[in-house]
Amino acid sequence: QVHLVESGGGLVQAGGSLRLSCVASGRTFRSTCMGWFRQAPGQEREFVGWSGRSTYYANSVKGRFTISRDSAENTGYLQMNSLKPEDKAVYYCAAREGPYGSSRFEDYVYWGQGTQVTVSS
């Protein structure tokens, strides 16, 4: 079992930055791949990126968002720069076994509770 807790969401102006954190407990963090997803009201859950043996991003956030991990602290981060109003959503971290992630939310077993990100124009 892996338990995930996100934090760091909030309200920011367009062009600003936020850093989300995802603290993992339970199974060894090193053996899992962490993914990030987001969901806006009335929309499907959307892939943002994943970090495992490598890192992969959705085109919509590439160059603006950066995923990192601190294995010593069992924590993953999503650094979001140059935020746009369309980035407004609830952001979720997720984990799956193995060194590589997936862009499909169905492939993740463990999920955090989500944190709200709001970007004002």
Image: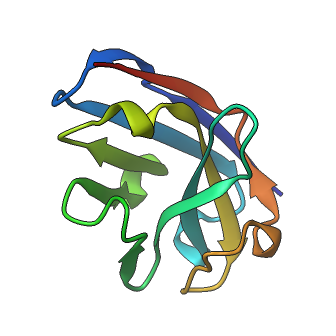
Colour approach in the figure: rainbow
Residue 72 appears at what percent x and percent y?
A: 38, 54
Q: Which sits in the foreground, 114 or 4?
A: 114
> Horizontally, is 67 left or right of 45 in the view?
left
Q: Is residue 53 left or right of residue 22?
A: left
In this rendering, the answer to whether 57 lies above or below 89 is below
54 versus 51 height, above or below? below
Image location (x, y in percent) of residue 41: 70, 31
Q: How many marks?
A: 0
**Quarter of the C terminus within the rendering:** top left
**In the depicted view, which residue is nearer to us: 95 or 37?**
37
Give above or below for 37 relative to 119.
below
Q: Is residue 49 above or below residue 38?
A: below
User: Where is residue 15, by image quadrant?
Assistant: top left
Left or right: 65 as drawn, with respect to 10: left
Which quarter of the figure is the N terminus placed in? Answer: bottom right
Q: Residue at 61% across / 75% down in the picture?
A: 103
For the residue pair 72 and 54, the one nearer the viewer reads as 54
Q: Is residue 60 left or right of residue 1?
A: left
Residue 71 place in picture, x, y as percent: 41, 60
Q: Residue at x 29, y 30 (%)?
A: 18
- The structure residue drawn at horizontal position 82% and vertical position 64%, both measured from the top left corner, is 109
Residue at the image point whose x is 63% and y is 34% from the top: 5
Residue 25 image point, x, y percent:
66, 46
